[in-house]
Image (cartoon, grey):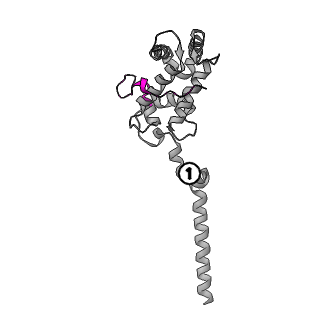
Protein backbone atom coordinates (compact mmCIF):
# COMPACT_ATOMS: atom_id res chain seq x y z
CA UNK A 1 0.00 0.00 0.00
CA UNK A 2 2.78 2.37 1.05
CA UNK A 3 4.69 1.52 -2.19
CA UNK A 4 1.76 2.33 -4.45
CA UNK A 5 1.12 5.60 -2.58
CA UNK A 6 4.76 6.57 -3.05
CA UNK A 7 4.40 5.75 -6.78
CA UNK A 8 1.37 8.03 -7.10
CA UNK A 9 3.18 10.84 -5.28
CA UNK A 10 6.21 10.49 -7.56
CA UNK A 11 3.97 10.56 -10.62
CA UNK A 12 2.14 13.62 -9.26
CA UNK A 13 5.43 15.44 -8.57
CA UNK A 14 6.74 14.51 -12.02
CA UNK A 15 3.62 15.86 -13.72
CA UNK A 16 3.77 19.11 -11.70
CA UNK A 17 7.42 19.64 -12.65
CA UNK A 18 6.72 18.74 -16.28
CA UNK A 19 3.85 21.22 -16.66
CA UNK A 20 5.76 23.92 -14.77
CA UNK A 21 8.73 23.60 -17.16
CA UNK A 22 6.40 23.67 -20.18
CA UNK A 23 4.72 26.81 -18.88
CA UNK A 24 8.03 28.57 -18.26
CA UNK A 25 9.21 27.82 -21.80
CA UNK A 26 5.98 28.89 -23.47
CA UNK A 27 5.73 32.24 -25.35
CA UNK A 28 2.71 33.06 -23.20
CA UNK A 29 4.83 33.15 -20.07
CA UNK A 30 7.67 35.01 -21.76
CA UNK A 31 5.47 37.76 -23.27
CA UNK A 32 2.69 38.05 -20.74
CA UNK A 33 -0.54 36.29 -19.99
CA UNK A 34 -2.44 38.04 -22.78
CA UNK A 35 -0.26 36.61 -25.55
CA UNK A 36 -3.16 34.43 -26.68
CA UNK A 37 -4.80 37.65 -27.86
CA UNK A 38 -1.64 39.22 -29.27
CA UNK A 39 -2.52 38.51 -32.89
CA UNK A 40 -5.53 40.80 -32.49
CA UNK A 41 -3.21 43.61 -31.44
CA UNK A 42 -0.80 43.16 -34.34
CA UNK A 43 -1.24 44.82 -37.73
CA UNK A 44 -2.93 42.23 -39.93
CA UNK A 45 -0.14 42.40 -42.51
CA UNK A 46 2.11 40.78 -39.89
CA UNK A 47 -0.21 37.81 -39.43
CA UNK A 48 -1.56 37.46 -42.98
CA UNK A 49 -0.10 37.30 -46.46
CA UNK A 50 -0.45 40.82 -47.90
CA UNK A 51 1.28 42.08 -51.09
CA UNK A 52 4.37 44.23 -50.36
CA UNK A 53 2.92 47.14 -52.34
CA UNK A 54 -0.11 47.26 -50.05
CA UNK A 55 1.95 46.83 -46.88
CA UNK A 56 3.85 50.01 -47.77
CA UNK A 57 0.57 51.88 -48.05
CA UNK A 58 -0.74 50.47 -44.79
CA UNK A 59 2.45 51.42 -42.95
CA UNK A 60 2.51 54.93 -44.40
CA UNK A 61 -1.05 55.64 -43.29
CA UNK A 62 -0.73 54.00 -39.89
CA UNK A 63 0.25 57.18 -37.93
CA UNK A 64 -2.83 59.03 -39.25
CA UNK A 65 -5.08 56.10 -38.35
CA UNK A 66 -3.61 55.75 -34.86
CA UNK A 67 -4.18 59.44 -34.22
CA UNK A 68 -7.93 58.86 -34.70
CA UNK A 69 -8.21 55.35 -33.23
CA UNK A 70 -8.18 56.39 -29.58
CA UNK A 71 -9.24 53.02 -28.13
CA UNK A 72 -6.64 51.17 -30.29
CA UNK A 73 -9.05 48.53 -31.62
CA UNK A 74 -8.10 48.98 -35.31
CA UNK A 75 -11.58 50.33 -36.02
CA UNK A 76 -12.71 53.96 -36.29
CA UNK A 77 -16.17 54.38 -34.83
CA UNK A 78 -18.37 57.39 -35.52
CA UNK A 79 -17.48 59.12 -32.26
CA UNK A 80 -13.75 58.85 -32.95
CA UNK A 81 -14.27 60.14 -36.49
CA UNK A 82 -16.38 63.09 -35.32
CA UNK A 83 -13.90 63.95 -32.56
CA UNK A 84 -11.07 63.93 -35.10
CA UNK A 85 -12.91 66.14 -37.60
CA UNK A 86 -13.73 68.63 -34.85
CA UNK A 87 -10.18 68.62 -33.48
CA UNK A 88 -8.71 69.15 -36.96
CA UNK A 89 -11.01 72.11 -37.62
CA UNK A 90 -10.37 73.74 -34.25
CA UNK A 91 -6.62 73.56 -34.84
CA UNK A 92 -6.76 76.40 -37.38
CA UNK A 93 -9.92 78.21 -36.32
CA UNK A 94 -7.84 80.68 -34.35
CA UNK A 95 -10.61 83.18 -33.60
CA UNK A 96 -13.14 80.41 -32.81
CA UNK A 97 -15.79 81.77 -35.17
CA UNK A 98 -16.51 78.47 -36.94
CA UNK A 99 -14.84 79.60 -40.16
CA UNK A 100 -11.40 79.18 -41.69
CA UNK A 101 -10.80 82.56 -43.29
CA UNK A 102 -7.97 83.20 -45.75
CA UNK A 103 -5.39 83.73 -42.99
CA UNK A 104 -6.36 80.50 -41.25
CA UNK A 105 -6.46 78.57 -44.55
CA UNK A 106 -2.98 79.87 -45.41
CA UNK A 107 -1.76 78.69 -42.01
CA UNK A 108 -3.19 75.20 -42.56
CA UNK A 109 -1.38 75.02 -45.93
CA UNK A 110 1.84 76.25 -44.36
CA UNK A 111 1.79 73.66 -41.56
CA UNK A 112 0.87 70.88 -44.00
CA UNK A 113 3.74 71.86 -46.27
CA UNK A 114 6.24 71.99 -43.39
CA UNK A 115 5.33 68.49 -42.23
CA UNK A 116 4.81 66.83 -45.60
CA UNK A 117 8.28 65.24 -45.78
CA UNK A 118 7.86 63.55 -42.40
CA UNK A 119 4.54 61.99 -43.36
CA UNK A 120 4.76 61.50 -47.11
CA UNK A 121 8.44 61.35 -48.05
CA UNK A 122 9.08 61.21 -51.79
CA UNK A 123 5.44 61.85 -52.69
CA UNK A 124 5.21 65.04 -50.62
CA UNK A 125 4.58 67.40 -53.56
CA UNK A 126 1.72 65.22 -54.77
CA UNK A 127 0.16 65.39 -51.29
CA UNK A 128 0.22 69.20 -51.30
CA UNK A 129 -1.74 69.22 -54.56
CA UNK A 130 -4.24 66.78 -53.10
CA UNK A 131 -4.64 68.85 -49.94
CA UNK A 132 -5.31 71.98 -52.01
CA UNK A 133 -7.82 70.06 -54.11
CA UNK A 134 -9.67 68.82 -51.03
CA UNK A 135 -10.00 72.31 -49.62
CA UNK A 136 -11.43 73.51 -52.96
CA UNK A 137 -13.84 70.57 -53.07
CA UNK A 138 -14.98 71.24 -49.50
CA UNK A 139 -15.55 74.97 -50.18
CA UNK A 140 -19.00 74.45 -51.71
CA UNK A 141 -19.90 78.13 -52.03
CA UNK A 142 -16.48 78.97 -53.50
CA UNK A 143 -15.94 81.97 -51.23
CA UNK A 144 -12.31 81.20 -50.44
CA UNK A 145 -13.13 80.31 -46.83
CA UNK A 146 -14.14 77.05 -45.17
CA UNK A 147 -17.01 76.92 -42.72
CA UNK A 148 -17.38 74.25 -40.04
CA UNK A 149 -20.37 72.88 -41.94
CA UNK A 150 -18.42 72.58 -45.21
CA UNK A 151 -15.45 71.03 -43.46
CA UNK A 152 -17.53 68.51 -41.51
CA UNK A 153 -19.67 67.39 -44.44
CA UNK A 154 -16.69 66.97 -46.76
CA UNK A 155 -14.56 64.92 -44.37
CA UNK A 156 -17.43 62.89 -42.91
CA UNK A 157 -18.42 61.96 -46.45
CA UNK A 158 -14.84 60.77 -47.08
CA UNK A 159 -15.13 58.42 -44.11
CA UNK A 160 -18.50 57.14 -45.33
CA UNK A 161 -16.92 56.38 -48.69
CA UNK A 162 -14.17 54.37 -47.00
CA UNK A 163 -16.77 52.25 -45.19
CA UNK A 164 -16.96 49.36 -47.66
CA UNK A 165 -19.35 47.18 -45.65
CA UNK A 166 -21.74 49.98 -44.55
CA UNK A 167 -21.43 49.27 -40.83
CA UNK A 168 -20.80 52.96 -39.96
CA UNK A 169 -17.25 52.12 -38.91
CA UNK A 170 -13.93 52.24 -40.75
CA UNK A 171 -11.59 49.30 -40.25
CA UNK A 172 -7.94 49.78 -41.04
CA UNK A 173 -8.28 47.67 -44.19
CA UNK A 174 -10.89 50.16 -45.37
CA UNK A 175 -8.87 53.17 -44.28
CA UNK A 176 -6.21 52.28 -46.84
CA UNK A 177 -8.74 53.27 -49.50
CA UNK A 178 -8.75 56.89 -48.34
CA UNK A 179 -7.21 58.13 -51.61
CA UNK A 180 -8.71 55.45 -53.83
CA UNK A 181 -12.35 56.44 -53.47
CA UNK A 182 -12.47 60.17 -54.07
CA UNK A 183 -15.28 59.84 -56.59
CA UNK A 184 -18.86 60.21 -55.30
CA UNK A 185 -19.48 56.55 -56.18
CA UNK A 186 -20.28 54.64 -53.01
CA UNK A 187 -20.62 57.78 -50.93
CA UNK A 188 -23.62 59.67 -49.63
CA UNK A 189 -25.14 63.02 -50.48
CA UNK A 190 -22.99 65.24 -48.29
CA UNK A 191 -25.78 67.80 -48.02
CA UNK A 192 -27.84 65.21 -46.14
CA UNK A 193 -25.15 64.68 -43.51
CA UNK A 194 -26.32 66.07 -40.19
CA UNK A 195 -23.71 68.53 -38.92
CA UNK A 196 -23.17 68.59 -35.14
CA UNK A 197 -23.06 71.88 -33.30
CA UNK A 198 -19.66 73.53 -33.36
CA UNK A 199 -18.45 74.09 -29.81
In the image, residue 109 sits, relative to residue 166, either above or below, namely above
Residue 69, position as x, y percentages in the image: 55, 35
- Tell me the quarter of the picture where residue 164 sits: top left
Where residue 86 appears, as percent x and y from the top left, is: 57, 26
Instruction: Please give the name of the residue rendered at 37% of the width and 23% of the height, measured from the top-left corner.
Output: 184
Please, is residue 17 above or below residue 160 in the view? below
* Magenta span of residues: 176-199
Who's the residue at 61% across and 77% down the image?
Answer: 10
Q: Which secondary structure dominates the residues rendered in magenta?
A: loop
Q: Is 80 or 96 nearer to us in this picture?
A: 96
Judge whether residue 190 is colored magenta: yes
Provide the residue designation for mark 1: 35
Q: Is residue 119 above or below residue 109?
A: below
The quarter in which the N terminus is drawn is bottom right
Q: Is residue 133 left or right of residue 99?
A: left
Residue 14 shows in this picture = yes
Numbered circles on residues, count: 1
Tag 1 secondary structure: helix
In this view, the residue in front, 120 or 132, is: 132
**Quick one: label 1, few (<14), some, or many (20+) residues within 10 Å?**
some
Q: Residue furthest right?
A: 95
Q: Position of residue 126 (x, y in %)?
A: 47, 15
Q: Nearer the viewer, residue 1 or 75?
A: 75
Q: Is residue 13 magenta?
A: no
Q: Quadrant of the C terminus?
A: top right
Farthest residue, direction left: 185
- Residue 92 horizontal/vertical position (percent): 61, 18
Which of the 4 image quarters holds residue 20? bottom right
Residue situated furthest bottom in the rendering: 1
Q: Is residue 53 visible?
A: no
Amino acid sequence: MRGSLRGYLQLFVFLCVFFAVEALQSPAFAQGADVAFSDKNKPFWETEKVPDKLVKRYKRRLPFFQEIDLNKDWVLNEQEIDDHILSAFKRYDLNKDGLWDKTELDLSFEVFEQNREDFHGAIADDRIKRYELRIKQADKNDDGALSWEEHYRFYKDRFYRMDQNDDAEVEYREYRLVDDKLSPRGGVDSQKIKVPEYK
